[in-house]
Amino acid sequence: MRQPIRAMVAMWPEITARLLPPDLRRRLDGLVTVVPDTPVTDFAVASAGEDLAATDVLITGWGCPPVDAAVLAAAPRLTAIFHAGGTVKPLLTEDAWQRGITISSAADAGAGPVADFTLAVVVLAGKRALPAARRYAAGHFPNHAQRVDGNDGRVVGVIGASRIGRRVIPRLAAAGYRVLVSDPYLDPADAAALGAELVDVDECCRRAGILSLHAPAIPATRHLIDARRLALMPDGATLINTARGALVDTEALTAACASGRIDAVLDVTDPEPLPPGHPLFSLPNVLITPHVAGVQGSELRRLGDFAVDELERFLLGEPLLGQVHRADLPILA
Ligand SMILES: NC(=O)c1ccc[n+]([C@@H]2O[C@H](COP(=O)([O-])OP(=O)(O)OC[C@H]3O[C@@H](n4cnc5c(N)ncnc54)[C@H](O)[C@@H]3O)[C@@H](O)[C@H]2O)c1
């Protein structure tokens, strides 16, 4: 008789209750035998070591230590990892790819909240609500002649037709924005199908009154938005960064925002966290949020749902929706 599939859950215990709430955990228990019953955060402890020897699949999440050569050696039966999180890059060493372990990420399930956050910020940026709010707090209530900013006819630039970018573009198009997209891996027909016009990064900066970054942090995107490109952006433009801080030259952005020419809404910064007292915190045209655009709190369940669905597809021999392929890693988040 075939032995039941053994799974190990490896992630911070404090997020497990939200990622795998009781009903979802019952579903998981109906698919596989989870051992140990509680999440593992250190593969090196003796009990985890013993359990690893019998583990067929890992359900991982934030707080899971790297699945490196030593872990793989202790887990001879391991055939698949279902990551209830975004990027798998910090989770894996080359050894997992060499062994041919199936890797799945729930990044797709986490894209929606970032796209929704972006749309909300674009709407506010289109009205230049941020500097208006600060002026209001300083005693200035605008008259009708001073209310010149609006969203109709706004051109929004999207850098990166990533999983998130591909959700942002149709949301913007449906809301009536004219959308430009820049992505070296996209062709004009795909861009048009999404609802955007494909342009290069410089043209995107030049034409977009609102520029939103959705590319991964990889060598090719480091300081993609530097002093030269900030200078291309129209007066009064807003830069939105929900991607990664490294895409932007922080010093150049600080200077551009301090001049009052560019507004910025940053969910991510370089460095992150930004040190207390950093000049960006005190600029009236800059809003910095502490990396909240992605799934958090009640949204974490999306990742657990995706991972358990994916595990079920795997057990049924169906195609996976979140499989990560080694060859794609260099251009993925
Ligand atoms: N703020 C948050 O809470 C939060 C949450 C999730 C993801 N993120 C970040 O959002 C960004 C997008 O995440 P994702 O999962 O959608 O990414 P993804 O893995 O889907 O991105 C890969 C795609 O980016 C595009 N791309 C690659 N190189 C590019 C380049 N040089 N210029 C433009 N586009 C390029 C390609 O289309 C590629 O397929 C990443 O930086 C990610 O780290 C932030």
Image (spheres, rainbow, N blue to C red):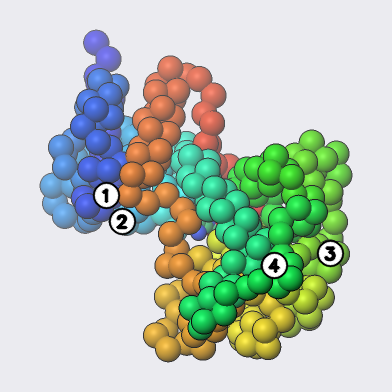
Q: Amino acid at mark 1?
A: Ile
- Residue of label 3: 207
| Nearer-N-terminus badge (2/1) | 1
Q: Position of residue 164 (x, y in %)?
A: 60, 48
| Nearer-N-terminus badge (3/2) | 2
- Residue of label 1: 15
In three-dimensional space, the C-alpha distance between marks 3 and 2, rounded to whole angstroms, equals: 41 Å
In the shown orientation, is residue 248 left or right of residue 206?
Answer: left
For image coordinates 58% across by 42% down, the residue present is: 325
- Image marks 3 and 1: residues in contact by CB distance under 8 Å: no
Ligand 1, seen in the image, is in the quarter at bottom right
| Nearer-N-terminus badge (3/1) | 1
Q: Amino acid at mark 2?
A: Gly
In the shown orientation, is residue 250 left or right of residue 42?
Answer: right
| Nearer-N-terminus badge (4/3) | 4
Q: Amino acid at mark 3?
A: Arg
- Image marks 4 and 2: residues in contact by CB distance under 8 Å: no
In the figure, 119 relative to 17: above or below?
below
How packed mark 2 is, by other alpha carbons closer than 10 Å (few <14, some 14-19, many 20 or more), is: some
Give the number of the disc on residue 144. 4
